Amino acid sequence: MKYNKHTLINQMKLMLDSRSINEGFARATVSAFAAQLDPMVEELTDIKTAVSEAVTNAIVHAYPDTTGKITLWAGIYVDGYFRVMVKDQGRGIEDIKLARQPLYSSLGDERAGLGFAVMESFMDSLRVRSTPGKGTTITMGKLIKGKRNDS
């Protein structure tokens, strides 16, 4: 089979309740899946941190007064690109541009307001799509250079 660099070669999907206890499980599961790319420790730590922030945002902001579902999808591409998506069906974001500004939080002083800034700093790409009342999808990507041997 002939591949191009954008060919998806493996993927996983996980659905969790929006409970704080599941944040660590989400982080560990996605990093275990990414480990098949043989990333450097720093690259794996970057992915774990970004996933942790995205899942925490869904728990805290999407479902502040209830428990809902969070879906994680991760994919590995033939060129070593790793993509992860965190999706909720919660409140959604009224103003994505404002929400992405460092130190802004819709919960005021309760939160640091650094979630999107952290995700962006640790990943190569970050896309946020949201519809108020319907939910938010965060898609992040990172090219894993790691210890791979491109033979």
Image (cartoon, rainbow, N blue to C red):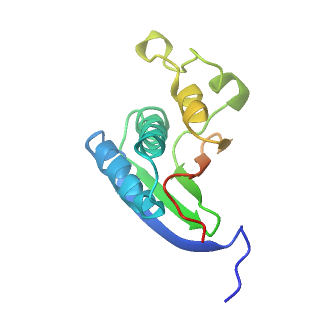
> Looking at the figure, which quarter contains the C terminus?
bottom right
> Looking at the figure, which quarter contains the N terminus?
bottom right
Q: Position of residue 124 (x, y in %)?
A: 64, 42
Of the pair 105 and 149, the residue shown nearer to us: 149
Residue sticking out furthest to the bottom: 1
Q: Is residue 126 above or below residue 115?
A: below
Q: Is residue 4 above or below residue 61?
A: below
The residue shown at (41%, 36%) is: 56
Q: Quadrant of residue 94?
A: top right
The residue shown at (40%, 49%) is: 68
Residue sticking out furthest to the top: 109
Q: Position of residue 127 (x, y in %)?
A: 68, 43
Of the pair 75 and 131, the residue shown nearer to us: 75
Q: Position of residue 46 (x, y in %)?
A: 47, 39
From the viewer's perspective, is 63 left or right of 23?
Answer: right
Q: Quadrant of residue 81?
A: bottom right
The residue shown at (47%, 56%) is: 72
